[in-house]
Image (cartoon, helix red, strand yellow):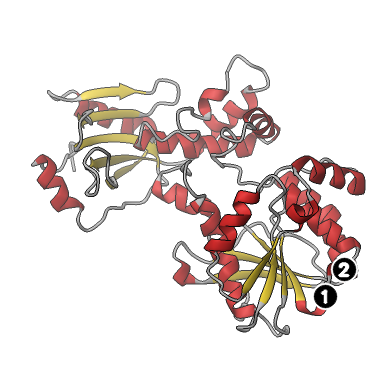
Amino acid sequence: MFDNPVGSQMPVEYVINWGRGVDSTAYLVAVLEDLDAHGIDPERTCVITMATGDEWPDTDADAERYILPMLRDKGLRLVQLARAGQSLTSGIDVLDDSRSPERLVRRGRWALWDEMEANGTVPQQGGIRKCSIRAKGDVGDLWLKLATGGRPFRQMIGFNADETGRRDRDRTASKLPLRTGVYPLIDWGWGRQKCEDFLYERLGVRWKKSYCTFCCYPVSMGALPVHLDRLRAFPEIAGRVLRLEYTSMRLNPNSRLFGRRSLLGQFDAERSTDRPVLDAFAAELASCDWAIYHLRRILPVSASDPTVRGQALRSVRRLRTGDPARLARAVERVGSRPGRRTEREETYGSVRVWRRERAKVLPTTEDFIVTAPAYVMDKQKDVFESEWIRHTHLPPLSLPGT
Protein backbone atom coordinates (compact mmCIF):
# COMPACT_ATOMS: atom_id res chain seq x y z
CA MET A 1 0.00 0.00 0.00
CA PHE A 2 1.11 3.57 -0.58
CA ASP A 3 1.01 6.41 1.93
CA ASN A 4 0.85 8.92 -0.94
CA PRO A 5 -1.97 7.85 -3.28
CA VAL A 6 -0.63 9.98 -6.14
CA GLY A 7 3.13 9.60 -5.87
CA SER A 8 5.66 12.01 -7.33
CA GLN A 9 4.35 11.85 -10.90
CA MET A 10 3.40 15.03 -12.73
CA PRO A 11 -0.33 15.85 -12.91
CA VAL A 12 -2.38 13.58 -15.14
CA GLU A 13 -4.09 15.09 -18.20
CA TYR A 14 -5.40 11.94 -19.89
CA VAL A 15 -6.84 8.95 -18.01
CA ILE A 16 -7.62 5.61 -19.65
CA ASN A 17 -10.07 3.45 -17.70
CA TRP A 18 -9.28 -0.23 -18.09
CA GLY A 19 -11.90 -2.57 -16.67
CA ARG A 20 -10.00 -5.63 -18.03
CA GLY A 21 -13.03 -6.79 -20.01
CA VAL A 22 -13.60 -7.05 -23.75
CA ASP A 23 -14.55 -3.46 -24.54
CA SER A 24 -11.98 -1.57 -22.48
CA THR A 25 -9.22 -3.99 -23.49
CA ALA A 26 -10.07 -3.51 -27.17
CA TYR A 27 -9.71 0.26 -27.07
CA LEU A 28 -6.61 0.04 -24.87
CA VAL A 29 -4.91 -2.27 -27.38
CA ALA A 30 -5.90 0.05 -30.24
CA VAL A 31 -4.45 3.03 -28.38
CA LEU A 32 -1.24 1.20 -27.49
CA GLU A 33 -0.68 0.33 -31.13
CA ASP A 34 -0.27 4.02 -31.99
CA LEU A 35 -0.08 6.46 -29.08
CA ASP A 36 0.61 9.46 -31.31
CA ALA A 37 -2.50 8.86 -33.42
CA HIS A 38 -4.61 9.10 -30.28
CA GLY A 39 -2.86 12.14 -28.87
CA ILE A 40 -1.31 10.23 -25.99
CA ASP A 41 1.66 11.75 -24.16
CA PRO A 42 2.97 8.92 -21.94
CA GLU A 43 4.32 11.42 -19.43
CA ARG A 44 0.90 12.90 -18.75
CA THR A 45 -1.27 9.82 -19.32
CA CYS A 46 -2.11 6.95 -17.05
CA VAL A 47 -4.17 3.79 -17.24
CA ILE A 48 -6.20 3.07 -14.11
CA THR A 49 -7.76 -0.24 -13.13
CA MET A 50 -9.68 -1.14 -10.00
CA ALA A 51 -9.21 -4.42 -8.13
CA THR A 52 -12.60 -5.67 -6.97
CA GLY A 53 -11.09 -8.67 -5.19
CA ASP A 54 -13.14 -11.24 -7.11
CA GLU A 55 -12.22 -10.97 -10.78
CA TRP A 56 -12.12 -14.24 -12.69
CA PRO A 57 -8.61 -15.72 -12.67
CA ASP A 58 -8.66 -16.48 -16.39
CA THR A 59 -9.47 -12.85 -17.23
CA ASP A 60 -6.60 -11.62 -15.08
CA ALA A 61 -4.27 -14.28 -16.51
CA ASP A 62 -4.95 -13.10 -20.08
CA ALA A 63 -4.55 -9.47 -19.01
CA GLU A 64 -1.16 -10.21 -17.47
CA ARG A 65 -0.02 -12.28 -20.43
CA TYR A 66 -1.08 -9.96 -23.24
CA ILE A 67 -1.65 -6.42 -21.95
CA LEU A 68 0.99 -5.82 -19.30
CA PRO A 69 3.84 -6.46 -21.78
CA MET A 70 2.32 -3.87 -24.12
CA LEU A 71 2.13 -1.31 -21.31
CA ARG A 72 5.75 -2.02 -20.36
CA ASP A 73 6.85 -1.68 -23.98
CA LYS A 74 5.23 1.76 -24.28
CA GLY A 75 6.24 2.88 -20.78
CA LEU A 76 2.64 3.79 -20.07
CA ARG A 77 1.82 4.21 -16.42
CA LEU A 78 -0.60 1.70 -14.87
CA VAL A 79 -2.18 2.59 -11.53
CA GLN A 80 -3.97 -0.22 -9.69
CA LEU A 81 -6.50 0.94 -7.10
CA ALA A 82 -8.86 -0.51 -4.52
CA ARG A 83 -11.19 0.73 -1.86
CA ALA A 84 -9.51 0.71 1.57
CA GLY A 85 -12.63 0.08 3.66
CA GLN A 86 -16.38 -0.26 3.58
CA SER A 87 -16.76 3.48 4.14
CA LEU A 88 -15.18 5.76 1.60
CA THR A 89 -13.83 7.77 4.53
CA SER A 90 -11.30 4.93 4.87
CA GLY A 91 -9.80 6.17 1.62
CA ILE A 92 -8.28 4.11 -1.17
CA ASP A 93 -5.28 1.85 -1.63
CA VAL A 94 -2.82 2.27 -4.45
CA LEU A 95 -1.88 -1.36 -4.96
CA ASP A 96 0.73 -0.65 -7.62
CA ASP A 97 1.84 2.40 -9.63
CA SER A 98 4.32 1.53 -12.31
CA ARG A 99 5.45 2.08 -15.91
CA SER A 100 6.68 -1.52 -15.98
CA PRO A 101 3.94 -3.52 -14.26
CA GLU A 102 4.66 -7.22 -13.81
CA ARG A 103 1.40 -8.42 -12.29
CA LEU A 104 -2.16 -7.46 -11.48
CA VAL A 105 -2.94 -7.18 -7.78
CA ARG A 106 -6.11 -9.13 -7.10
CA ARG A 107 -7.50 -7.17 -4.13
CA GLY A 108 -6.83 -4.52 -1.51
CA ARG A 109 -7.68 -4.46 2.18
CA TRP A 110 -11.41 -4.35 1.39
CA ALA A 111 -13.46 -6.07 -1.29
CA LEU A 112 -17.15 -6.08 -2.11
CA TRP A 113 -17.23 -9.74 -1.09
CA ASP A 114 -16.33 -8.71 2.47
CA GLU A 115 -19.39 -6.48 2.66
CA MET A 116 -21.74 -9.09 1.18
CA GLU A 117 -20.46 -11.80 3.51
CA ALA A 118 -20.57 -9.68 6.67
CA ASN A 119 -24.13 -8.55 5.86
CA GLY A 120 -25.36 -11.98 4.79
CA THR A 121 -26.58 -10.65 1.45
CA VAL A 122 -25.95 -10.97 -2.28
CA PRO A 123 -25.76 -8.16 -4.87
CA GLN A 124 -29.14 -6.73 -5.83
CA GLN A 125 -30.48 -6.55 -9.37
CA GLY A 126 -32.32 -3.53 -10.68
CA GLY A 127 -31.54 0.17 -10.83
CA ILE A 128 -27.99 1.46 -11.00
CA ARG A 129 -25.16 -0.95 -10.33
CA LYS A 130 -24.30 0.26 -6.86
CA CYS A 131 -21.72 -2.46 -6.38
CA SER A 132 -19.75 -1.25 -9.40
CA ILE A 133 -19.95 2.34 -8.20
CA ARG A 134 -18.66 1.37 -4.75
CA ALA A 135 -15.84 -0.89 -5.90
CA LYS A 136 -14.79 1.04 -9.00
CA GLY A 137 -16.38 4.41 -9.68
CA ASP A 138 -15.94 5.97 -6.24
CA VAL A 139 -12.37 4.68 -6.04
CA GLY A 140 -11.32 6.11 -9.38
CA ASP A 141 -12.98 9.46 -8.72
CA LEU A 142 -11.23 9.88 -5.39
CA TRP A 143 -7.82 9.14 -6.89
CA LEU A 144 -8.42 11.39 -9.89
CA LYS A 145 -9.23 14.38 -7.72
CA LEU A 146 -5.72 14.10 -6.34
CA ALA A 147 -3.88 12.99 -9.47
CA THR A 148 -5.17 15.74 -11.74
CA GLY A 149 -4.14 18.48 -9.34
CA GLY A 150 -7.34 20.45 -9.88
CA ARG A 151 -6.65 20.75 -13.62
CA PRO A 152 -8.95 19.81 -16.51
CA PHE A 153 -8.46 16.26 -17.81
CA ARG A 154 -9.91 13.80 -20.27
CA GLN A 155 -11.06 10.32 -19.28
CA MET A 156 -11.39 7.51 -21.80
CA ILE A 157 -14.28 5.15 -21.02
CA GLY A 158 -14.99 1.86 -22.78
CA PHE A 159 -18.70 2.03 -23.56
CA ASN A 160 -19.19 0.32 -26.90
CA ALA A 161 -21.33 1.56 -29.78
CA ASP A 162 -24.36 -0.33 -28.45
CA GLU A 163 -24.21 1.58 -25.14
CA THR A 164 -24.90 5.19 -26.02
CA GLY A 165 -27.32 5.39 -23.10
CA ARG A 166 -24.50 4.63 -20.67
CA ARG A 167 -22.43 7.38 -22.28
CA ASP A 168 -25.26 9.87 -21.83
CA ARG A 169 -25.69 8.93 -18.17
CA ASP A 170 -21.95 9.16 -17.61
CA ARG A 171 -21.86 12.68 -18.96
CA THR A 172 -24.59 13.90 -16.64
CA ALA A 173 -23.66 11.89 -13.54
CA SER A 174 -19.97 12.74 -13.35
CA LYS A 175 -18.90 14.17 -9.98
CA LEU A 176 -15.72 15.66 -11.47
CA PRO A 177 -16.54 19.07 -13.00
CA LEU A 178 -13.17 19.43 -14.78
CA ARG A 179 -13.52 16.05 -16.49
CA THR A 180 -14.28 15.51 -20.17
CA GLY A 181 -15.44 12.03 -21.03
CA VAL A 182 -14.03 10.39 -24.16
CA TYR A 183 -15.83 7.39 -25.65
CA PRO A 184 -13.68 6.03 -28.49
CA LEU A 185 -15.61 2.83 -29.18
CA ILE A 186 -18.80 4.79 -29.76
CA ASP A 187 -16.94 7.27 -31.95
CA TRP A 188 -15.48 4.40 -33.99
CA GLY A 189 -18.79 2.54 -34.21
CA TRP A 190 -17.36 -0.51 -32.48
CA GLY A 191 -20.01 -2.74 -30.94
CA ARG A 192 -19.33 -5.74 -28.74
CA GLN A 193 -18.72 -8.15 -31.59
CA LYS A 194 -16.27 -5.80 -33.27
CA CYS A 195 -14.30 -5.53 -30.02
CA GLU A 196 -14.19 -9.32 -29.64
CA ASP A 197 -13.09 -9.80 -33.25
CA PHE A 198 -10.43 -7.07 -32.97
CA LEU A 199 -8.84 -8.69 -29.92
CA TYR A 200 -8.90 -12.12 -31.54
CA GLU A 201 -7.25 -10.70 -34.66
CA ARG A 202 -4.56 -8.87 -32.68
CA LEU A 203 -3.92 -11.30 -29.82
CA GLY A 204 -5.23 -14.65 -31.03
CA VAL A 205 -7.44 -15.09 -27.97
CA ARG A 206 -11.17 -14.88 -27.39
CA TRP A 207 -11.25 -12.36 -24.57
CA LYS A 208 -13.39 -13.31 -21.61
CA LYS A 209 -15.87 -11.12 -19.76
CA SER A 210 -14.69 -9.21 -16.72
CA TYR A 211 -17.03 -9.26 -13.72
CA CYS A 212 -17.09 -10.48 -10.14
CA THR A 213 -17.47 -14.21 -9.65
CA PHE A 214 -20.61 -13.61 -7.56
CA CYS A 215 -22.23 -11.10 -9.93
CA CYS A 216 -26.02 -11.17 -10.13
CA TYR A 217 -26.26 -9.83 -13.69
CA PRO A 218 -25.35 -12.77 -15.99
CA VAL A 219 -28.97 -13.93 -15.90
CA SER A 220 -30.34 -10.54 -17.01
CA MET A 221 -27.65 -10.20 -19.69
CA GLY A 222 -28.63 -13.52 -21.24
CA ALA A 223 -25.23 -14.96 -20.36
CA LEU A 224 -26.25 -17.46 -17.68
CA PRO A 225 -25.21 -20.62 -19.61
CA VAL A 226 -21.73 -19.22 -20.20
CA HIS A 227 -21.54 -18.08 -16.58
CA LEU A 228 -22.45 -21.56 -15.31
CA ASP A 229 -19.82 -23.16 -17.54
CA ARG A 230 -17.27 -20.75 -16.12
CA LEU A 231 -18.23 -21.76 -12.59
CA ARG A 232 -17.89 -25.42 -13.58
CA ALA A 233 -14.36 -24.66 -14.78
CA PHE A 234 -13.53 -23.22 -11.33
CA PRO A 235 -15.45 -25.43 -8.86
CA GLU A 236 -13.67 -24.00 -5.80
CA ILE A 237 -14.85 -20.52 -6.75
CA ALA A 238 -18.34 -21.87 -7.45
CA GLY A 239 -18.47 -23.52 -4.03
CA ARG A 240 -17.56 -20.26 -2.33
CA VAL A 241 -20.20 -18.29 -4.26
CA LEU A 242 -22.82 -20.91 -3.46
CA ARG A 243 -21.96 -20.57 0.22
CA LEU A 244 -22.52 -16.81 -0.02
CA GLU A 245 -25.93 -17.32 -1.63
CA TYR A 246 -26.89 -20.12 0.75
CA THR A 247 -26.14 -17.95 3.78
CA SER A 248 -28.08 -15.07 2.26
CA MET A 249 -31.11 -17.26 1.58
CA ARG A 250 -31.10 -18.68 5.09
CA LEU A 251 -31.30 -15.14 6.45
CA ASN A 252 -33.84 -14.11 3.81
CA PRO A 253 -35.64 -16.82 1.81
CA ASN A 254 -36.19 -14.35 -1.04
CA SER A 255 -32.54 -13.36 -1.35
CA ARG A 256 -31.55 -15.49 -4.33
CA LEU A 257 -28.55 -14.47 -6.40
CA PHE A 258 -30.59 -14.11 -9.59
CA GLY A 259 -33.79 -12.63 -8.18
CA ARG A 260 -36.42 -15.28 -8.79
CA ARG A 261 -33.81 -17.95 -9.48
CA SER A 262 -31.08 -19.22 -7.23
CA LEU A 263 -27.60 -20.16 -8.36
CA LEU A 264 -27.84 -23.41 -6.42
CA GLY A 265 -30.94 -24.35 -8.40
CA GLN A 266 -28.94 -24.29 -11.64
CA PHE A 267 -26.81 -27.28 -10.63
CA ASP A 268 -27.98 -30.91 -10.64
CA ALA A 269 -26.33 -33.56 -8.48
CA GLU A 270 -27.16 -36.17 -11.13
CA ARG A 271 -25.19 -34.30 -13.78
CA SER A 272 -21.51 -35.33 -13.82
CA THR A 273 -20.30 -31.86 -14.82
CA ASP A 274 -22.07 -30.34 -11.79
CA ARG A 275 -20.85 -32.82 -9.21
CA PRO A 276 -17.46 -31.07 -8.61
CA VAL A 277 -19.27 -27.78 -8.01
CA LEU A 278 -21.69 -29.26 -5.49
CA ASP A 279 -18.88 -31.18 -3.80
CA ALA A 280 -16.93 -27.93 -3.44
CA PHE A 281 -20.01 -26.26 -1.98
CA ALA A 282 -20.49 -29.06 0.54
CA ALA A 283 -16.81 -28.80 1.48
CA GLU A 284 -17.23 -25.05 2.08
CA LEU A 285 -20.13 -25.65 4.45
CA ALA A 286 -18.30 -28.45 6.25
CA SER A 287 -15.08 -26.50 6.76
CA CYS A 288 -16.53 -23.41 8.45
CA ASP A 289 -18.12 -22.68 11.80
CA TRP A 290 -21.88 -22.24 11.86
CA ALA A 291 -24.03 -19.96 13.95
CA ILE A 292 -27.57 -19.51 15.17
CA TYR A 293 -28.91 -16.15 14.05
CA HIS A 294 -31.95 -14.27 15.25
CA LEU A 295 -33.53 -12.35 12.37
CA ARG A 296 -36.22 -9.74 12.67
CA ARG A 297 -37.41 -7.75 9.71
CA ILE A 298 -39.87 -4.84 9.41
CA LEU A 299 -41.49 -4.26 6.02
CA PRO A 300 -43.18 -0.86 6.33
CA VAL A 301 -45.40 1.16 4.05
CA SER A 302 -43.62 3.85 2.05
CA ALA A 303 -44.04 7.29 3.61
CA SER A 304 -44.47 8.85 0.17
CA ASP A 305 -46.72 6.20 -1.39
CA PRO A 306 -48.93 4.02 0.84
CA THR A 307 -49.46 1.54 -1.99
CA VAL A 308 -45.82 0.39 -2.06
CA ARG A 309 -43.34 -0.99 0.43
CA GLY A 310 -40.90 1.31 2.15
CA GLN A 311 -37.27 0.66 3.05
CA ALA A 312 -37.06 -2.54 5.09
CA LEU A 313 -35.45 -2.53 8.52
CA ARG A 314 -33.48 -5.59 9.62
CA SER A 315 -31.95 -6.79 12.85
CA VAL A 316 -29.51 -9.69 12.77
CA ARG A 317 -27.99 -11.07 15.96
CA ARG A 318 -25.64 -14.03 16.24
CA LEU A 319 -26.70 -16.04 19.29
CA ARG A 320 -24.27 -18.95 19.31
CA THR A 321 -21.57 -20.57 17.15
CA GLY A 322 -20.38 -24.15 16.88
CA ASP A 323 -21.04 -27.47 15.20
CA PRO A 324 -23.93 -27.20 12.70
CA ALA A 325 -25.65 -30.42 13.80
CA ARG A 326 -25.67 -29.42 17.47
CA LEU A 327 -26.91 -25.94 16.62
CA ALA A 328 -29.66 -27.41 14.46
CA ARG A 329 -30.88 -29.54 17.37
CA ALA A 330 -30.98 -26.49 19.63
CA VAL A 331 -33.10 -24.61 17.10
CA GLU A 332 -35.40 -27.58 16.65
CA ARG A 333 -36.08 -27.60 20.40
CA VAL A 334 -37.22 -23.99 20.10
CA GLY A 335 -39.47 -25.06 17.25
CA SER A 336 -41.25 -27.58 19.43
CA ARG A 337 -42.97 -24.80 21.37
CA PRO A 338 -46.57 -23.86 20.50
CA GLY A 339 -47.04 -21.31 17.75
CA ARG A 340 -43.72 -22.04 16.04
CA ARG A 341 -43.14 -23.49 12.57
CA THR A 342 -39.93 -25.36 11.77
CA GLU A 343 -38.33 -25.58 8.34
CA ARG A 344 -35.51 -28.05 7.70
CA GLU A 345 -33.26 -27.72 4.68
CA GLU A 346 -32.53 -31.41 4.34
CA THR A 347 -29.60 -31.42 1.91
CA TYR A 348 -27.18 -29.19 3.80
CA GLY A 349 -28.72 -29.16 7.27
CA SER A 350 -29.87 -25.62 8.02
CA VAL A 351 -32.92 -25.28 10.30
CA ARG A 352 -35.21 -22.27 10.56
CA VAL A 353 -37.91 -21.71 13.20
CA TRP A 354 -40.51 -19.03 12.58
CA ARG A 355 -42.12 -17.15 15.42
CA ARG A 356 -43.74 -14.58 13.14
CA GLU A 357 -44.13 -14.83 9.35
CA ARG A 358 -44.66 -11.89 7.05
CA ALA A 359 -48.21 -11.19 5.91
CA LYS A 360 -49.26 -10.24 2.40
CA VAL A 361 -50.60 -6.89 3.59
CA LEU A 362 -48.25 -4.03 4.51
CA PRO A 363 -46.93 -3.13 6.95
CA THR A 364 -45.74 -6.50 8.16
CA THR A 365 -42.93 -8.13 10.11
CA GLU A 366 -41.11 -11.43 10.37
CA ASP A 367 -39.19 -13.04 13.21
CA PHE A 368 -37.18 -16.28 13.14
CA ILE A 369 -34.02 -18.03 14.21
CA VAL A 370 -31.90 -20.00 11.74
CA THR A 371 -28.62 -21.86 11.44
CA ALA A 372 -26.14 -20.77 8.76
CA PRO A 373 -22.37 -20.34 8.21
CA ALA A 374 -20.91 -18.02 10.84
CA TYR A 375 -19.72 -15.15 8.66
CA VAL A 376 -22.52 -12.65 9.24
CA MET A 377 -21.99 -9.83 11.73
CA ASP A 378 -24.56 -8.37 14.14
CA LYS A 379 -26.25 -5.35 12.65
CA GLN A 380 -29.27 -3.17 13.27
CA LYS A 381 -30.09 0.53 13.14
CA ASP A 382 -30.61 2.52 16.31
CA VAL A 383 -34.30 3.00 15.56
CA PHE A 384 -34.99 -0.68 15.07
CA GLU A 385 -36.06 -1.64 18.60
CA SER A 386 -38.55 1.19 18.95
CA GLU A 387 -39.97 0.44 15.49
CA TRP A 388 -40.17 -3.28 16.30
CA ILE A 389 -42.12 -2.69 19.48
CA ARG A 390 -44.40 -0.26 17.67
CA HIS A 391 -45.14 -2.83 14.95
CA THR A 392 -45.36 -6.01 17.02
CA HIS A 393 -45.36 -5.51 20.81
CA LEU A 394 -43.21 -8.70 20.94
CA PRO A 395 -40.37 -9.39 23.39
CA PRO A 396 -37.03 -10.80 22.15
CA LEU A 397 -36.84 -14.47 21.18
CA SER A 398 -34.57 -16.58 23.42
CA LEU A 399 -32.87 -19.94 23.18
CA PRO A 400 -32.75 -22.51 25.98
CA GLY A 401 -29.69 -21.82 28.11
CA THR A 402 -29.21 -18.23 26.89
Image position, residue 336 (x, y; %): 18, 23
Are circles 1 and 2 on residues that touch, CB within 8 Å? yes
State left or right for residue 285 relative to residue 329.
right
Query: Which residue is painted at 64% across and 83% down in the image?
Result: 151
Residue 60 in percent (x, y) is at 74, 51
Residue found at x 27% / y 53%: 380
Q: What secondary structure is marked by label 1? A: helix
| Few, some or many residues within 10 Å of mark 1 (<14, 14–19, 20+) | some
Amino acid bearing label 1 = Pro
Tell me where residue 291 appears, x and y as whole percent. Answer: 35, 41
Query: How far across and how far down the image is residue 274, in percent?
Result: 63, 23
Q: Residues within 10 Å of mark 2 (few under 14, many from 20)?
A: some
Going by the numbered disc 2, the residue's amino acid type is Leu
Separation of residues labelled 1 and 2 (CA atoms): 8 Å
- Is tag 1's residue or tag 2's residue first in the polypeptide sequence? 2
Judging depth in this view, the residue of 82 and 209 nearest the camera is 209
> Given the current orientation, which residue lies at the most extreme left position?
393
Q: On the image, numbered disc 1 is attached to which residue? A: 42
Residue beneath the point at 37% across and 29% down: 350
Q: Nearer the viewer, mark 1 or mark 2?
A: 2
Residue found at the very far top of the displayed protein? 270
Residue carrying label 2: 35
Say if 123 sits above or below 53 in the image.
above
Figure check: 167 above or below 278: below
